[in-house]
Image (cartoon, rainbow, N blue to C red):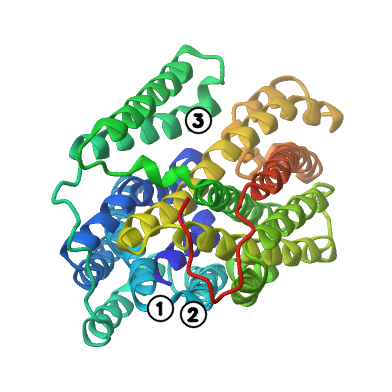
Amino acid sequence: MMVALDGTVVSVANPTIGADLGASLAGLQWVTNGYLLALAVLLVAGGKLGDRFGRKLVLCVGVSGFALASLGCALSSSIGPLIACRVAQGLAGALLMPNTLAIIRATFAPGQLNRAVGIWGGSSSLATASGPIVGGMLAQHVSWQSIFLLNVPLGALAAAVTWAAVEESRDERSGRGLDPPGVALLLGSLFALVWGIMKTQTHGWGAGYTLGFLGAGAALLAAFAWREATARQPLIPLDLFRSRSFSAGVALVAIGLFALFGVLFFITLYLQRVHGYSPVETGVRMLPLTGVIAFTAPIGGVLTERFGPRLPLAAGMLILGAAMLGLRPLAPHSGYGAIWPWFLAMGVALGLVIVSATQAIVGDAPVERGGIAGGLQATANQLGGVLGTAVLGSVLAGRAGAALGARLEEAGVSGALAGTVLEWKGAVAQGLAPPLPRAAGAELAGRVGEACHLAFLDGLHAVILVGALVAFAGAGVALLVRRGRPSGGAPAFG
């Protein structure tokens, strides 16, 4: 719940953080992506540490480190230290997150595993649901720093309860090596890819700077795959991916979180910057999306137990794509009635997808590799979030910037004033309108603001379309998942 909460609690507070620290859109993206990327890179290593040294021990270390890093976030006075402390949060989260699933895998018999994973998914989904509301209330009535201070007492309590209540488990046959070269190659490849994607907002997709980073990321990723195939003790045993269900499950977790984080990041900007809602009002309006996941995740566990993961995965992805298309007609003055039914449908879909895909991953892996499987599940989770904010952020910024000139022309804004507004493309991509001199008058300022909001929505519509197409592709991937058996059968591998 702590890791999931910090993935979404910042979303509603992002506009407040940006205004207080003077952050750009890229800076705000790194507040989210620095956390998610650190998680993604080291989650498998965190799972291996738990397999080797004891999952209970590593979980407690991770919880304690997470609380300390949260304190550092709260004490940050500029965007750079905040991003650094968010990275530290991600590193600590990489120790605790995979070992939660590994402990569940080691504790429950096959007949109980689906329900246990459903409860696990419901718990983390409850945190995801409460994140925007908790973040909105604290950012509006206390300060954005308080959203991080919340983790300090929670971390202390979680570490104490874990140490007292959880039985230690480990894989006695686990190798001692953690494959540092593999970790370095994975870190370098993911950083280069995400950095290159985010820099398309300023350099464009065809620029040498962008292509250089994307090419370097692809080369490092290929080197990582070669390293894992030849290493005696690889970070990620590639033979796990011989299971079609396992591979498809990893892909589907990433696709589902791609949509969730992409929508959370940009819809909160739309609700606050275009509609003018407060952080609390925004968090409450996100509840049909985030809150319903807490209820549909356990249902996904029951459906997976009864029918296997294929049916809920395919249905969830189709519902997700249709719901995203339903959000495409959003306009600056759209009523909430045009939003919440699609949020509700997305919440239903994500609850089905996340739990069913998790079962496809963890249930298909051998028990002794529970930590690695849990790490890969959480890695796919965080990578989906990173790519959701990075790729869709690039799409939004590019489309909004390209549409701004035409929108200003439609509003009758031209000449030097139009040139001045065009220099604020970065702000427009956040749903903001540039400040105008008082001499411009309220009527002209209103037309400029409307043009900027329409350009932002042009970008948002493009983001929603890309997300929908990715979700529909995910429905095809879901057909690759093994149909499954009734709950009494032991999970298979292969």
Residue 108 — which label?
1
Residue 62 — which label?
none
How far apart marks 2 and 3 lie (CA) works out to 42 Å
Residue 112 — which label?
2
Q: Nearer the viewer, residue 408 or 85?
A: 85
Q: Position of residue 287 (x, y in %)?
A: 65, 71
Say what amino acid the circle numbered 1 marks: Phe
Q: Where is residue 384 in the image (x, y as percent from the top left)?
A: 52, 47
Q: Is residue 280 left or right of residue 373?
A: right
Q: Position of residue 29 (x, y in %)?
A: 48, 44
Q: Which of 214 and 459 is in front in this view?
A: 214
Residue 376 in view: yes
| Displayed quadrant of residue 151 | bottom left
Q: Determine whether 118 is above or below 245 in the image.
A: below
Are discs 1 and 3 less than 8 Å apart at CB? Answer: no
Say what amino acid the circle numbered 3 marks: Ile
The residue mark sitting in front, 2 or 3, is 2
Q: Which of 133 and 121 is in front in this view?
A: 121
Q: Residues within 10 Å of mark 1 (few under 14, many from 20)?
A: some
Q: Residues within 10 Å of mark 3 (few under 14, many from 20)?
A: many
Q: Determine whether 116 is above or below 179 in the image.
A: below
Are discs 1 and 2 less than 8 Å apart at CB? Answer: yes
How far apart marks 1 and 2 lie (CA) works out to 6 Å
Residue found at x 60% / y 56%: 264
Q: What element carries label 2?
A: helix
